[in-house]
């Protein structure tokens, strides 16, 4: 609040420092700026946890360094740019908004997210998009094991390689991998996507400034063997 | 050698006497029907045989709702109160006041708006999905009348229940259905679910017949497909991560509301000690007797620690870690009456949560629409068919016609009266024990009737006036 009140010119980004200040104080300043549609630069994020949690509003917050767990978590709006790496649960529970991580991201990127976009320029850790409900996760590097685990919806797009058990127990979400797939998860199957879907994905990537054309897209979807729990499916179900 | 044992009989009794005379059938003794004719095998009981036949047909384990049928559980009935006599002074049970106000989340002094309840009982997390919208609304209205709260369950926040509740606890379950920032901010408390007493270590289960269009929309699931929720949270693994998660929730709620952690009782001493480190304001320990909308039957009967055993263990953990008073303890699982409430409080709980009992007061198992009970193979008073979605009284269903059988106002009145009756029962016992607040009930007010109950609760054995130890 102090930085806002300091009479900084409305068009210039608000500049604050996180350092070792209470996270509650830092977040209040971030929220006030983002709510007001102001851009804000957070210096010295020092990989602190819970930065930029629960944002609403149109503003842009730029973290000038790495952030810890749950950056942008539970947000319903806001735009975040992390100029370093991010910890676990980046953008978890995101309902709307846009998060860009210029470096790598830890485990569970976009866990249970319901909308919005998360863009990881580096690699993403395991369980990326776990329990995702909707929205887009785009990873320019590789993705870790169990990407898309029990995802209910939405799309995860990986331009690099995928580690093991990708698309395990999917409900409705899809995982797109351009590179190699180490192993598929339970009930995950690879299908060749329709051209219209490829165009859609490439358009989504294009909007993020990524050239997705000419890739060897593998689309991973639910085999739907785990969908029903009835007598006739008992044997299929028991393969877990 | 064997030949040495041979001896000639000196007298052979008359065969009629050996077979008890009249009524003897050839090859079978007369009189009391034989054990093999009556199916009295303690191992291969009728239930076991039926279970094997069912599984042979289904090719899977059996599922059902409600709660455990386990026969060997210790019960609150194994404890009795020792009211004031010569060494303590009772309060006037029908006249004097006994405080029932219960505050949760004030322990650390960090939460802006702790949960303040008029009674030491609140209504457990039963999701929209497991229960009908009408039932959720009625529970909310009844709880509001009684000055207490209900919990959303894992299906997200229903507008009807937000409107009806004075105080609403919002649940963050591992599956994270419809976790919405606006809902979190409209909640009066937020609960991280680690597990539940009915089936600890397992995620929720909602069979396809209850995944209606509205439930499916709220949970972002395909309609009519069985929902088997995750058992692990997607974005944290252990207690140290949970600490950060709790901080995130505090940030999202601007430190206004308490954060609860709910777990099934499995290792209540150690789990409570660990949970108390996470920074949570309230720990809910849900015992084995806890109910559920649907579960593999074997989990209901064979997993967890009974409520009676879990409360003293959890309290001991809070005492040993110096967290008593800072972190509040809610006990749950099979609480049936104000007597159970008083016993739970005396054993160390700060508050009690009821699920099945509240549902029954709504109208579950009431003798109406008997033909619909018959249609699903059961009868009023013995129905545990929540999993089928065909609840004859409209409580545990998503069927529109059945749901409409819950008259929200009438049902809420029953819930209110039941909560009031429970509270009266608890205060009557507290006053007899000389307590001006139900929260002053203490282990010394109790005696155990059985060695087992005494051994694991640490309550003095009746007559011996000291706990049974080994």
Image: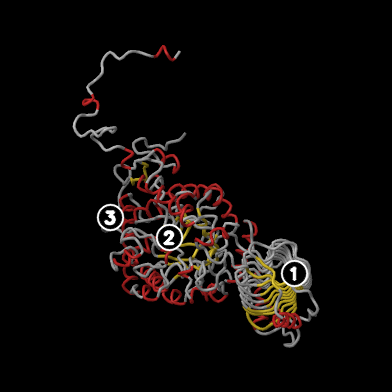
Residue at the limit of the structure toward the top, as seen here = B4
Residue A36, image quadrant: bottom right
> Residue under mark 2: which chain is it in?
B
**In this rendering, position of residue A142 left or right of residue B195:** right
Q: What residue do we see at 43% from left, 52% from top?
A: B53
**In this rendering, position of residue A7 left or right of residue B264:** right
Q: Marks 2 and 3, how far apart in space?
A: 39 Å
> Residue under mark 1: which chain is it in?
A
At numbered mark 2, what does the secondary structure look like: helix, strand or loop? strand
Residue A236: image x %, image y %? 58, 60
Q: Mark 1 points at which residue?
A: A45
Rendered view: A91 above or below B87: below
| Most foreground residue, B186 or A203 | A203
Q: What residue do we see at 39% from left, 40% from top?
A: B460
| Most foreground residue, B461 or B154 | B154
Residue B33, image quadrant: top left
Q: Few, some or many C-alpha atoms within 10 Å of disc 1 (few <14, some 14-19, many ≥20)? A: many
> Residue under mark 3: which chain is it in?
B
Residue B93, numbered circle: 3
Q: Of marks 2 and 3, which one's residue comes earlier in the chain?
A: 2
- Which color scheme does this rendered protein use? secondary structure
Residue B65, numbered circle: 2
**In this rendering, position of residue B247 left or right of residue B457:** right
| Most foreground residue, B299 or A222 | A222
């Amino acid at each position: 609040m102090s930085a806002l009140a300091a009479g900084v010119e409305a068009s210039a980004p608000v500049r604050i420092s996180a350092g070792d200040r209470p996270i509650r104080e830092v977040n209040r300043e971030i929220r006030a700026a983002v709510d007001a549609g102001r851009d804000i630069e957070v210096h010295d994020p020092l990989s602190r946890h819970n930065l930029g949690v629960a944002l609403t509003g149109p503003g842009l917050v730029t973290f000038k360094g790495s952030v810890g767990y749950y950056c942008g978590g539970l947000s319903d709006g806001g735009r975040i740019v992390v100029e370093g790496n991010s910890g676990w649960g980046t953008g978890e529970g995101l309902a709307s908004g846009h998060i860009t991580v210029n470096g790598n991201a830890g485990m569970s990127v976009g866990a249970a997210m319901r909308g919005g976009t998360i863009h990881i320029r580096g690699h993403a850790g395991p369980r990326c998009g776990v329990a995702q409900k909707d929205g887009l996760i785009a990873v320019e590097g590789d993705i870790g094991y169990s990407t898309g685990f029990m995802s209910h919806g939405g799309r995860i797009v990986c331009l690099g390689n995928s580690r093991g058990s990708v698309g395990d127990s999917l409900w409705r979400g899809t995982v797109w991998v351009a590179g190699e797939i180490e192993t598929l998860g339970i009930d995950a199957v690879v299908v060749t996507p329709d051209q219209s879907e490829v165009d859609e994905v490439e358009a989504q990537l294009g909007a993020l400034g990524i050239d997705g054309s000419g890739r060897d897209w593998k689309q991973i979807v639910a085999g739907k063997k785990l969908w029903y729990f009835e007598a006739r499916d008992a044997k299929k179900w028991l393969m877990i | 050698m064997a030949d040495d044992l041979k001896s000639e009989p000196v007298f052979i009794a008359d065969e009629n006497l050996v077979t008890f005379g009249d009524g003897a059938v050839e090859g079978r003794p007369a009189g009391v029907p034989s054990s093999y004719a009556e199916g009295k095998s303690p191992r291969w009981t009728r239930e076991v045989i039926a279970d094997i036949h069912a599984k042979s047909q289904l090719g899977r384990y059996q599922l059902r709702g409600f709660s455990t049928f386990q026969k060997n559980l210790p019960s609150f009935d194994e404890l009795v109160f020792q009211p004031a006599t010569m060494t303590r002074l009772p309060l006037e049970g029908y006249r004097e006041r006994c405080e029932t106000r219960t505050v949760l989340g004030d322990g650390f002094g960090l939460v802006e708006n702790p949960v303040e309840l008029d009674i030491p009982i609140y209504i457990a997390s039963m999701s929209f999905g497991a229960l009908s919208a009408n039932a959720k609304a009625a529970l909310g209205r009844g709880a509001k009348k009684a000055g207490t709260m209900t919990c959303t369950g894992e299906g997200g926040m229903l507008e009807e229940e937000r409107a009806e509740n004075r105080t609403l606890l919002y649940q963050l379950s591992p599956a994270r259905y419809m976790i919405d920032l606006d809902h979190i901010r409209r909640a009066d408390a937020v609960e991280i679910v680690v597990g539940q007493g009915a089936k600890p270590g397992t995620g929720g289960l909602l069979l396809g017949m209850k995944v209606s269009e509205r439930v499916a929309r709220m949970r972002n699931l395909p309609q009519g497909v069985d929902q088997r929720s995750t058992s692990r949270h997607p974005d944290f693994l252990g207690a140290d991560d949970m600490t950060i998660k709790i901080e995130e929730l505090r940030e999202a709620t601007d430190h206004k509301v308490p954060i609860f952690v709910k777990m099934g009782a499995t290792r209540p001493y150690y789990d409570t000690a660990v949970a108390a480190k996470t920074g949570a304001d309230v720990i809910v320990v849900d015992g084995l007797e806890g109910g559920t909308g649907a579960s593999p039957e074997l989990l209901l009967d064979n997993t967890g620690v009974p409520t009676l055993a879990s409360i003293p263990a959890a309290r001991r953990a809070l005492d040993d870690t110096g967290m008593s008073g800072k972190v509040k303890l809610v006990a749950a699982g099979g609480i049936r009456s104000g007597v159970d409430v008083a016993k739970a409080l005396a054993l160390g709980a700060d508050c009690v949560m009821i699920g099945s009992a509240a549902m029954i007061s709504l109208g579950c198992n009431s003798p109406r629409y008997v033909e619909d009970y018959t249609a699903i193979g059961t009868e009023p008073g013995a129905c545990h068919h929540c999993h089928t979605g065909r609840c004859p009284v409209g409580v545990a269903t998503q069927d529109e016609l059945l749901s409409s059988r819950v008259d929200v106002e009438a049902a809420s009145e029953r819930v209110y009266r039941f909560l009031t009756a429970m509270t009266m029962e608890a205060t009557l016992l507290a006053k007899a024990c000389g307590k001006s607040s139900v929260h002053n009930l203490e282990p010394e007010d109790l005696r155990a009737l059985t060695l087992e109950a005494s051994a694991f609760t640490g309550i003095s054995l009746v007559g011996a006036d000291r706990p049974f130890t080994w």
